[in-house]
Amino acid sequence: MCQLLGMNCNVPTDICFSFTGFQARGGLTDVHADGWGIAFFEGKGTRVFLDPEPSAHSPVAALVRQYPIRSRNVIAHIRKATQGVVALENTHPFMRELWGRYWIFAHNGNLLDFAPPLDGSVMPVGNTDSERAFCWLLTALRRRFGDQAPPTAELFAALTELSVDLGSRGECNFLLSNGDWLFAHCSTQLTYIVRRAPFAKAHLTDQDVTVDFSEVTTPNDRVAVIATQPLTDDEVWTPLPPGSLWWFEEGEVRASAPTVAGPAEKCRYHCGSG
């Protein structure tokens, strides 16, 4: 399956250390060789790097690994294709505009026969189930809330309901952000860690690289890292329960909610009727 990586912080932080280990999983220490991408939020803008080549051998990935872009929210993805050809247009993460903000989405899983009706306001460019799911989510949110963004708590509640539907279609781990927060949905496998003072050393699982975070942080820094599998072998990572949506903001968990549908909760491609 694909691999996801997300970072949410209370201050702009670079992701070079985590990305060094993550990059290796794209064709060196693992089999995810069908493309990769990463998106950094900077204010209301985003820097997005995409490459259909394996990340372990990509010159673009090498540039990102060595370029200390500082961001409060980052989403990265390395792909093992299940639906859609290996091509740039099918490379995650995907970006769209909603309510005057860029939204970034990356998905790991397989939504079989997922062909929801879309109203044309947000349409996929490629042919993956992942991009269709993203377009469906944004269409549902626009229909539910109109032209104004709701308070984040209401948004989280709406996404919890929509994730119940997506989770009933198949494996659906995803990361979603608009630059203010990061939502993580665990269908089968996601883990996270929150790093805060007192900071210590950490060693990557996929590369022989160690960093002493106490030398590159301040006592007030707080960084949440979300990954499909733990990136370090000497820290304690917390698994997210399958069937749950998590809200990260300012480098910590703000809320979580179950997304396992009961008999009365299942729906069929609704788009949020209020």
Image (cartoon, rainbow, N blue to C red):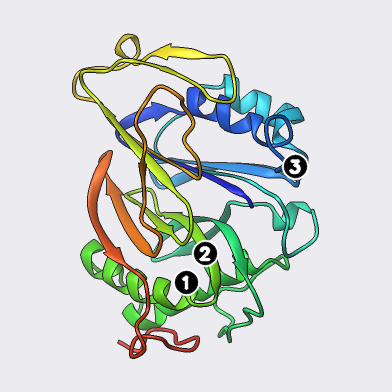
* Mark 3 in CB contact with mark 2 (< 8 angstroms): no
Q: CA distance from mark 3 to mark 1?
A: 25 Å
Task: Point out residue 150 in the picture as x, y percentages from the top left corner.
Answer: 26, 69
Which residue carries the number 3 mark?
33
As drawn, 32 above or below 111 = above
* Mark 1 in CB contact with mark 2 (< 8 angstroms): yes
For the point 67% across and 48% down, the residue is 79
Residue type for callout 3: Ala
Q: CA distance from mark 1 to mark 2?
A: 6 Å
Q: CA distance from mark 3 to mark 2?
A: 20 Å
Q: Residue 149 sits in which quadrant?
A: bottom left
Q: Tag 3: Cα neighbours inside 10 Å, few (<14), some, or many (≥20)?
A: many
Residue type for callout 2: Cys
For the point 52% across and 75% down, the residue is 136
Residue type for callout 1: Gly
Secondary structure under the numbered disc 2 in the rendered image: strand
As drawn, 154 above or below 54 = below
Q: Is residue 153 left or right of residue 30?
A: left
Which residue carries the number 2 mark?
172
As drawn, 189 above or below 218 = below
Quarter of the picture holding the C terminus: bottom left
Q: Tag 1: Cα neighbours inside 10 Å, few (<14), some, or many (≥20)?
A: many
